[in-house]
Image (tube, grey):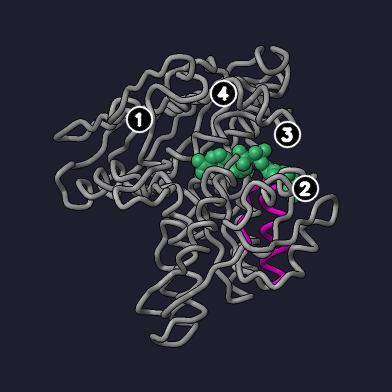
Amino acid sequence: MIFDDTYRPFFENARQRPLIDRRFGVCEVDLVAIASRTGLRADQYRVSAGSRIGPFASYHGGNAIEQLCRSDADFVCVASPDHRHFAAARDALNAGKHVLIEKPSVLFLQELDELDRIARRQGKLCRVVYHKLFDPDHKKLRTFVADGQLRHVNNGYCSLLEPKQISGKQFAEWLGGRNPGTYVAVHYIKLIDFTFGGRLVSVSCSGQRGIVGPADGNTWDSTQLRLIYRYPDEREAAFDIHTSWVTPDNFPGYVEQEVQFRFDNGVWNGHSRRRGIECTIEGKTPLEIKITINNHYNGTFLEPFGDRSQRGYGIEVLEQFAREVACVEFGSEGTREQRLDAVRAMEYADISADRQVVAAVQAMEAILERHVAGQPDALVRVNDWAGGLVLYTPGNSSPEVLYPAEV
Ligand SMILES: NC(=O)c1ccc[n+]([C@@H]2O[C@H](COP(=O)([O-])OP(=O)(O)OC[C@H]3O[C@@H](n4cnc5c(N)ncnc54)[C@H](O)[C@@H]3O)[C@@H](O)[C@H]2O)c1
């Protein structure tokens, strides 16, 4: 799905127009290979894309990633299901490729540490796609915060509700044992973490089951995550993030996304479906075409000058990564090491700066796992006396250390 949404248009755009930048000149970006489970959609894509894309290899089956790693690709984008990111990213880094991973980067801090270690050893980038940081509305929020217009966040809520077809059809192959929180709450965990800074203090989470799987099973319909952050002035903020993948398919938008952040001196309200369009077309909306269309994320357009285009912040974020790789490899300023360090210092995407997001995900998954085992309402404390990530379960006097080192 995400390949079709963003990677496909990125590579097709780049084939038409190479990257041009004073720092590295002209850089062609070719899609050289795809690794997938069955190869079926890659074959379909080759036919449907025609001349919009150049020749590429398609590897599938058990050793698809191994074959991809032997190709001469300069960078590898990992867009497999959430719990299959780590192994692919590790193998690609070990093979000397730069790596871009779809959110959520990885599910455990131990995995994050390993990827960061390999990337540094190999002198390669390991970065994560959080396209919501490129949404103009979120950039404005961060600008207001950075400029002191909005002062000290106190609390807030976010919700992101996916349609049933995501859990019932799109992800049917890998949905077992998964939850919508890991899949989409990370968008907002990252937004909160990156925009407001601060130290993550604790994580709690509840959830519901019974639609996509049995009521006592380990596959979740919806989750409610709560994060507490502490800031350098010792004040705290609480954030509630609600997610679901069982919203009816005839919902007017693709996904329902809403945020509210309350500050000492203001309130920020954002609603994905209320920032633009409402369109009705008989027989098409809301299933084939959505009533509320997000033209900022990823839209197909007839440009005023006649071209057909596909653009938006979901594609922009990929182009930015390709520019960063080009800068490291072909830039003319400073040494390669200096250019690598300069890109890594742009923390919005670096794996090493994703620690608190991964910590929140790891905590949430552990809490849900305990719930399935009949011990609901666990809480994870971050950087307390027992370790970096520590799980406390009601009625159990000994905490479980999920990650011993400082988060
Ligand atoms: N940034 C966003 O807004 C956004 C949106 C959707 C999905 N995503 C993320 O992108 C990732 C993929 O999601 P999707 O919706 O495209 O899922 P999808 O099920 O449509 O595609 C997953 C792809 O991974 C391949 N795959 C699965 N197991 C594999 C393996 N072991 N080896 C090689 N390939 C394998 C499949 O063949 C398929 O092509 C997820 O991590 C998801 O969280 C991000």
Point 26% across, 38% down: residue = 153
Q: Looking at this view, is 397 or 382 the one in front?
A: 382
Extreme front residue here? 306
Residue identified by numbered label 3: 174
Say which amino acid is labelled 3: Trp
Return the disc, 2 or 4, that comes first in the chain's sequence.
2
**Mark in front: 1 vs 2:** 2
Residue identified by numbered label 2: 39
Instruction: Give, as a single range, the part of the protein colored magenta.
Output: 76-95
**Mark in front: 2 vs 3:** 2
Asked whether the viewer can see residue 295, the reply is: yes
Q: Is residue 141 left or right of residue 77?
A: left
Assess whether mark 2 and mark 1 are in contact (beta carbons under 8 angstroms).
no
Return the disc, 1 or 2, that comes first in the chain's sequence.
2
The numbered disc on residue 245 is 4
Some atom of ligand 1 lies within 8 Å of the CB belonging to the residue at label 3: yes
The numbered disc on residue 272 is 1
Return the disc, 2 or 3, that comes first in the chain's sequence.
2
In the rendered image, the vertical position of residue 203 relative to residue 135, given as above or below: above
